[in-house]
């Protein structure tokens, strides 16, 4: 059987225009810009406007058009859509199908949603890589598109300061024989013993939205911040070390580290654990906050478009999220 090396053919991202600053949030809850910056590194975040189709699938359509252009492909070249959304457009049809429709794809490619919360996009990558490697699909669109403002409780200062909306995508395909792009290694994990630390219970099959649920404000995200923080640092560091070792490389071989953008202190703590030079760690949490599974592909797209990440660079992704899920992927861009 012939195997192919996987290459990121093109990337794209979309951020809504509307900016919500820390001072804007401080008008509603008891917080302030300095506290938020000191504890999280976040200065502002974007907020989607569904009336402008800034929905998970709508933002993904805009980001995908940019990725298609970068990859020199057309919508009908996509033969599989893997769509990570913590809160999808709707329960069904899935956001992947909504995106297929918005892109005008007529080739009937399969389209499915993946929910591993903030780790969703990183979860989808090894799946896409395996299907490219084995030749099952040629051009897989991997989307992380999130409207966190739809689960954010704007009256809860513990959580509402953290999240923002946005989308990042990558199109994965085959590297040609004279190229050395490849996915070296990946590891995915989940520890459900910590499932209650970051949770949105209501709205699904177990707890429908009722008057009682709304009165108790159970339709919003709930979080035990410090537990998530500790777990995030530990798992992102250990999974990163594992993928690098599995690839037969060392930390010195990593050109760029793109961690999930949840909190600057988490990012710095992970970097320090393996003595990673700060100038190789990609950070944009100050501008966009935590866009859930979109943080890593947005950061990738920004750094590729700014010419910082170049062909041949070794890139490490690491993410964590509700579940608690976690994952790391190491590849040559
Ligand atoms: C949420 C988080 C920023 C809180 O920071 P922290 O340093 O752990 O702060 P604590 O929860 O210990 O709270 C310290 C104090 O600040 C207060 N506080 C909490 N949020 C506040 C806010 N937005 N503004 C001002 N004060 C706030 C708390 O009430 C507490 O007050 P107290 O000491 O009087 O009880 C931090 O725990 C975190 O980022 N955790 C990870 C969350 C995450 O990444 N989630 C997404 C995962 S994908």
Image (tube, helix red, strand yellow):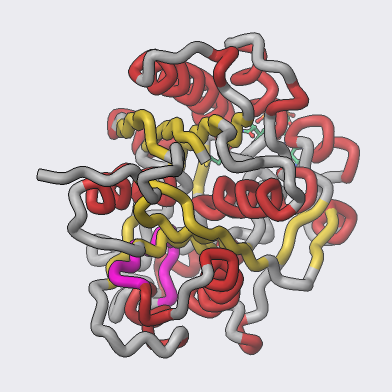
In-front residue for pair 120/156: 120
Tell me if residue 83 is in the magenta stretch: yes
In the rendered image, the vertical position of residue 11 relative to residue 176, given as above or below: below
Ligand 1 positioned in quadrant: top right
In-front residue for pair 306/242: 306
Q: Position of residue 77 (x, y in %)?
A: 37, 75
Range drawn in magenta: 78-89
Q: Is 91 left or right of 148, judged from the image as shown?
A: left
**Name of the residue lying farthest toward the front:** 178
Tell me if residue 236 is in the magenta stretch: no
In-front residue for pair 72/215: 72
In the rendered image, the vertical position of residue 242 relative to residue 195, given as above or below: above
Q: Is 36 left or right of 222, judged from the image as shown?
A: right
Let me know if residue 7 appears in the view: yes
In the rendered image, the vertical position of residue 55 relative to residue 44, given as above or below: below
Q: Position of residue 63 (x, y in %)?
A: 58, 70
Residue at 21 percent across and 43 percent down: it is 3
Q: Is 273 left or right of 213, judged from the image as shown?
A: right
Residue at 54 percent across and 51 percent down: it is 292
In the rendered image, the vertical position of residue 167 relative to residue 131, given as above or below: below
Q: Position of residue 27 (x, y in %)?
A: 87, 60
Q: Position of residue 205 (x, y in %)?
A: 24, 66
Q: Is 151 left or right of 2, judged from the image as shown?
A: right
Number of marks in picture: 0
Residue at 73 percent across and 41 percent down: it is 308
Q: Quadrant of residue 259?
A: top right
Tell me the quarter of the image containing the N terminus: top left
Residue at 59 percent across and 49 percent down: it is 295
Let me know if residue 199 appears in the view: no
């Amino acid at each position: 059987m012939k195997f192919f090396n996987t290459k990121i053919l093109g990337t794209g991202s979309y951020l809504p225009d509307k900016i919500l600053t820390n001072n804007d949030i401080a008008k509603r809850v008891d917080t302030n810009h300095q506290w938020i910056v000191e504890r999280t590194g976040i200065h502002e975040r974007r907020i989607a406007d569904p009336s402008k189709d800034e929905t998970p699938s709508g933002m993904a359509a805009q980001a995908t058009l940019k990725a298609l252009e970068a990859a020199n492909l057309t919508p009908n070249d996509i033969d599989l859509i893997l769509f990570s959304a913590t809160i999808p457009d709707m329960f069904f049809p899935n956001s992947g199908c909504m995106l297929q429709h918005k892109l005008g794809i007529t080739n009937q490619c399969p389209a499915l949603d993946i929910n591993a919360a903030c780790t969703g996009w990183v979860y989808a990558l090894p799946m896409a890589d395996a299907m490219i490697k084995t030749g099952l699909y040629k051009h897989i669109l991997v989307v992380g598109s999130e409207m966190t403002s739809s689960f954010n409780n704007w009256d809860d200062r513990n959580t509402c300061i953290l999240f923002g909306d946005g989308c990042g995508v990558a199109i994965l395909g085959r590297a040609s024989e004279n190229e050395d792009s490849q996915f070296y290694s990946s590891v995915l994990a989940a520890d459900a013993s910590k499932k209650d630390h970051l949770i949105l219970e209501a709205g699904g099959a177990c707890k429908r939205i009722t008057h009682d649920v709304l009165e108790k404000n159970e339709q919003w995200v709930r979080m035990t911040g410090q537990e998530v923080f500790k777990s995030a640092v530990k798992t992102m560091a250990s999974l990163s070390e594992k993928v690098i070792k599995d690839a037969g490389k060392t930390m010195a071989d990593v050109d760029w580290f793109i961690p999930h953008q949840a909190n600057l202190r988490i990012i710095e703590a992970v970097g320090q654990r393996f003595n990673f030079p700060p100038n190789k760690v990609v950070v944009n949490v100050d501008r966009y906050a935590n866009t859930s599974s979109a943080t890593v592909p947005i950061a990738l797209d920004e750094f590729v478009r700014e010419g910082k990440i170049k062909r041949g660079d070794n890139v490490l992704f690491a993410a964590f999220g509700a579940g608690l899920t976690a994952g790391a992927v190491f590849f040559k861009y």
